[in-house]
Amino acid sequence: LGWLLGYCRVFEASKFVPQATNFVFNIALPCLAVAGLGIGIDFYSDTILWNFIGAFLVLRGVALVVSLLLVIGDRKKGIGFVAVYWLCFTWISTGTHWMLLL
C-alpha cells in the first residue's frame, strides 16, 4: 500500500516518512502502551502492587549504583553529583535531560 501511494505520488516519502515516524514514536506507541497497561493490569491486586514496588526500588538501586560509578570515574566531581545523577535518572520529569549532565 505504501509503495502504491508513493508510486502514484499521493504521499512523498521524503516529507511523509519523517512526520509519520515522529507521530508513531511520540504519540501512537505511548498511547498504545498506556492503553495496554490500563486494560491488562489490575492495579487493585496486592500481588501486582508489591511486584511494582519491588521493581521500582530495584531500578532506583541500579540507578544509584550507576550514578556512583559515573562519579567515581571522574575525579573532578564530588558526592553531590551522585545525588544529581541519581535524581535525574530516577525522576520521570528529569529523566529525559540526564544526558546534558554527562
Image (cartoon, grey):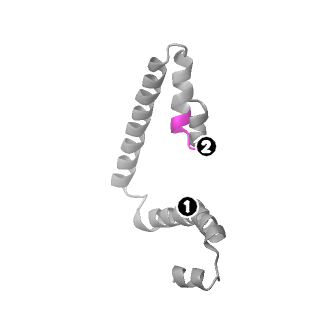
Q: Which residues are magenta?
A: 88-92
Residue beneath disc 1: 25
User: Type of residue at label 2?
Assistant: Ser
Q: Amino acid at mark 1?
A: Phe
Q: Which type of secondary structure does the marked residue at label 2 adopt? A: loop
Q: Quadrant of residue 78?
A: top right
What secondary structure characterizes most of the magenta part? Answer: helix
Which residue is rendered at x = 41% and y = 39% of the image? 59
Question: Relative to residue 92, is residue 45 depicted above or below?
Answer: below
Between marks 2 and 1 in the image, the one whose residue lies nearer the viewer: 1
Point 56% across, 29% down: residue: 102
Place of residue 90 in the rendered image (x, y in percent of width and height, measured from the top left): 51, 37
Q: Which residue is mark 2?
A: 93
Give residue 95's quadrant in the image: top right
Q: Position of residue 76 (x, y in %)?
A: 55, 13
Q: Residues within 10 Å of mark 2 (few under 14, many from 20)?
A: few
Mark 1 crowd level (few <14, some 14–19, many ≥20, 10 Å Cα): few
Which residue is pictured at 63% across the width and 71% down the height?
A: 16
In the image, residue 89 sits, relative to residue 7, either above or below, namely above
